[in-house]
Structure formats: C-alpha cells, structure tokens
Amino acid sequence: MASQRSSSNGQTPDPVGELRWNVSLPGGAQIGDFAECSGLTVEYDVMDYQEGGELTYTHKLRGGVKYPNIVLKRGVTHEENLLKWLFDRSERDSRGQITITLYADDAGTVRTWSFQRAFPIKWTGPSLNAKSTSIATETLEIQHQGMVPPS
C-alpha cells in the first residue's frame, strides 16, 4: 500500500510502511502520508429549552457546531512538503481546502474527508535520544473552519 508508493521524486519508496492517511491540497498537491489521524469530529452544542407548562420533558435543540483540530502523526520521512506547507500557508488569504484520504491495505480509497479554510498551526518534531530504539516521529496539527459535506 503506502509503503510501495514512491516519493515525490519517484525514486525511493517512503521508509514508513504503515502510512494509511494522505493529506492533499486542491489541484492534487500532496502534503504527505501519515500513520495516525485524530480530530475527525463534528460536534453540535445542545441547548435545553423548557416549554412553559410542560413538565414531562425538556426540548433539546441543536446549537452551534464545533470542530476540533486535526492531528496527524507519522515517522519522519524524506518528504519536505509538510514543512513547506507549514511555512507557505501562514497568510489568512491563502487558507484553502484540504482533503484527507484513508487508504485500505490494497491502496484503494476507503473514504475521503474535506475541510475548508485549513491551515497548519503546530508542528512537533522528534525527540532525539541516541539511546532510544523508537522511531523518530513528527506531528502536524491543522486548524480548519469546518468539514465540507460529501457531494
């Protein structure tokens, strides 16, 4: 699957074999592949409304919508698009739509989600320790203004 996909230069495969999430910008520009993705959540506030004279129940009304940040994690790779996007997308007017794709083991698309006016707000690099045997990982946190309904 993703471990067989080539890098942006088409010469070497990505060194991390469990990359199942891909993040792309409009026009097909790839931010990268990731092993973990969290924050794919839409949550509505619920408002209680007590109707005058009605004592058996309280009306529940859907209020405003909340979207947490999307957090993506992966082992450090040779890809540089993630850091380029982190620095290139800092202007408010340049915020665009991103698409996150979940891939199956056979490299087929399972599902996609799109988010409007997205921009990276935090990158965390690896903790380096010469005595450690764990994989060097990086984390990208993305703020957005809502999920785009499927078409």
Image (cartoon, rainbow, N blue to C red):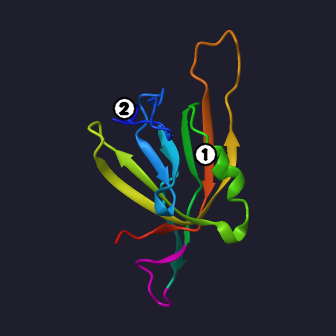
Furthest residue in direction bottom, as rendered: 52
**Boundaries of the magenta span:** 51-64
Q: Quadrant of the C terminus?
A: bottom left
Q: Residue flagged by tag 2: what amino acid is it?
A: Gln
Label placed on residue 122: none
Q: Quadrant of residue 135?
A: top right
Judge whether 138 appears above or below 85 on screen.
above
Furthest residue in direction top, as rendered: 131
Q: Residue 40: x and y, percent?
A: 48, 54
Q: Quadrant of residue 17?
A: top left
> Alpha-carbon neighbours of circle 1 within 10 Å: few (<14), some, or many (≥20)?
some
Judge whether 130 appears above or below 135 on screen.
above
Q: Residue 72: x and y, percent?
A: 55, 44
Q: Is residue 86 left or right of residue 110?
A: right
Label placed on residue 4: 2
Q: Earlier in the sequence, mark 2 or mark 1?
A: 2
Q: Residue 144: x and y, percent?
A: 59, 63
Compare residues 61 and 28 and report the one nearer the observer.
28
Q: Quadrant of the N terminus?
A: top left
Which residue carries the number 1 mark? 82
Tag 1 secondary structure: helix
Q: Residue at x 59, y 30 (%)?
A: 76
Compare residues 65 and 92 and report the one nearer the observer.
92
* Magenta-drawn stretch contains 44: no
Q: Residue 138: x and y, percent?
A: 62, 35
* Magenta-drawn stretch contains 55: yes
